Amino acid sequence: LKELFTEPADVAPAAGDRKKFKSTKFKGVTDTFSAQLTDLVGTLDKCDLHFVRCFKSNDQKKPDLVEDAVITRQLNTSGVLDALRVARTGFPDRMPFDEFCGNFLVVPGLGTKAELAGKAPKDRVLALLQKLGVPGQKFRCGKARVFFASGMLEGLRTRRLEMQAKVAVAIQAAGRGHIARKAARQLRRVREEALQAMLSAAAQEDVEALRAAIA
């Protein structure tokens, strides 16, 4: 669609050519539709598709009243269940090779990036999927994207979030440990300074200095 509705570049008229050219400022219905369609295709390429289907909760159209039989009837007659069965048998989730590697390359381990650095994009994706333990029947690789069976990509995202949570906990533990050790060193230094002051005051038999050191 994008190639079909892409406008060719305007060619400047040759010198002495008296042929009239259409002003680039004028936009007709076709130009407007083409621009809107191009924007729509670009938006669809950047997003994940989600379908929302609304159902009546009851035939009386009353608020706060849910009738299971009414909703079940609509699910069966509207084809939603059949559409879900078809979606589960296919590969509805997709992701470009570079985006997939960028999101999930660190999930198997920090050494995975260096290990797969010299591979082609498709080979890198296949090797990464093997490390992630994704069954072969749950994905397909195209020319530029990898396609997943229903629920597979969501499971990988959950694993990524769990890994990020573990890393965050480790960073928090390291930060709190550093702060606690710094506070302990400060407390130890204060105690040593107070002890030295007490010993010095005791040696000089200075009662006031000894009281100040004890305080």
Image (cartoon, rainbow, N blue to C red):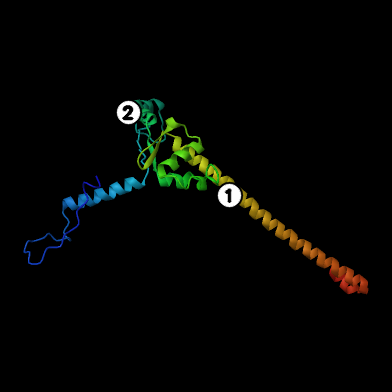
Left or right of residue 83: residue 183:
right
| Number of other residues with Cα within 10 Å of mark 2, as a class: few under 14, some 14 to 19, many 20 or more | few
Residue 85 in percent (x, y) is at: 37, 28
Q: Is residue 105 above or below residue 200?
A: above
Q: 41 or 53, which lies in front?
A: 41
- Element under label 2? loop
When the figure is inspected, residue 56 is found, relative to residue 207, above or below; the finding is: above
Kind of residue at badge 1 = Ala
* Horizontal arrangement in the rendering, residue 26 relative to residue 114 (left or right): left
Please identify the residue farthest to the left as the structure is shown: 18
Q: Name the residue nearer the viewer: 210 or 151.
A: 151
Q: Who's the residue at 35% across and 29% down the image?
A: 86
**Callout 1 touching callout 2 (CB < 8 Å):** no
Which dot marks residue 79?
2
Measured as percent of width and height from the top left, residue 65 is found at: 41, 32
Q: Which of the labelled discs sits on residue 89, or is there none?
A: none
- Secondary structure at badge 1 equals helix
Q: Position of residue 18 (x, y in %)?
A: 6, 64
Amino acid at the residue labelled 2: Gly
